[in-house]
Image (tube, grey):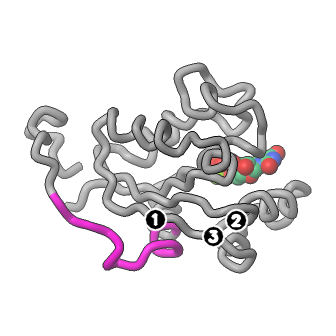
Amino acid sequence: MAAERTLIILKPDAVNRGLCGKVLARFEEKGFKIVGLKMMWLGREILEKHYAHLASKPFFPDLVGFMSSSPVILGVVEGRNAVEAVRNMCGVTDANKAAPGTIRGDFALSTSRNIIHASDSIETAKREISLFFKDEELYNYELNNKQFLYAGDELNR
Ligand code: UDP
Ligand code: MG
């Protein structure tokens, strides 16, 4: 069974505030494996697909404008319980209320300009990863320290 994967997007505020390295470092330090990473300048069409469930919200035009205002960095992070664990590391949507120690809690103040997107379920993660990454842009490889990250029964979960 393949280990769980989730999509992260370092939003234009992370890029323009020079925070991408710090944010990516948190996932590396936690022990997650980065299996895909690239910069893209997202256009309206792909953003309208990605955020389709928010199309009727009043903040939707601002969200699409913000997310297309500069290039972003997209990553696919793999590891045990990656979807839930990465969301927890990000903190709640309103960065003002996000707990200290989370990415949003430490680096942002806003409900909108909140540094990072992370998939919210395993099904969403699959859909979002395939929206932004081709199969050949994702890498299957072993971390050579995995026995120090996982107990035997946790490997590949
Ligand atoms: N957003 C916003 N205003 C709001 C709620 C959300 O601008 O009142 C933006 C914000 O950038 C958020 C994104 O829309 O990250 C997606 O919203 P969602 O509710 O899915 O939050 P998330 O899953 O990112 O925590
Ligand atoms: Mg969401």
**Residue 99 figure quarter:** top right
Residue 81, label in figure: none
Residue identified by numbered label 3: 41
Does any atom of ligand 1 lie closer than 8 Å to the CB of label 3? Answer: no
Magenta range is 128-141
- Is 127 on the left or on the right of 156, as rendered? right
Residue 143 is situated, as x and y percent measured from the top left of the image, at 16, 49
**Residue 134 figure quarter:** bottom left
Q: Which amino acid does the dot numbered 2 rest on?
A: Tyr
Q: Secondary structure at mark 2?
A: loop
Residue 49 is situated, as x and y percent measured from the top left of the image, at 67, 74
Q: Is residue 98 magenta?
A: no
Instruction: Tell me what residue is drawn at x 23 percent, y 61 percent.
Output: 2
Does any atom of ligand 1 lie closer than 8 Å to the CB of label 2? Answer: yes
**Cα separation between marks 3 and 1:** 10 Å
Viewer-nearest of labels 3 and 2? 3
The quarter of the image holding the N terminus is bottom left
Q: Secondary structure at mark 3?
A: loop
N-terminal label among 3 and 2: 3
Vertical arrangement, residue 9 with respect to residue 101, above or below: below
Residue 35 is situated, as x and y percent measured from the top left of the image, at 31, 59
**Residue 47 figure quarter:** bottom right
N-terminal label among 2 and 1: 1
**Label 2 near label 3: C-beta < 8 Å?**
no
- Is 56 on the left or on the right of 53, as rendered? right
Residue identified by numbered label 1: 38
Residue identified by numbered label 2: 51
**Cα separation between marks 3 and 2:** 16 Å
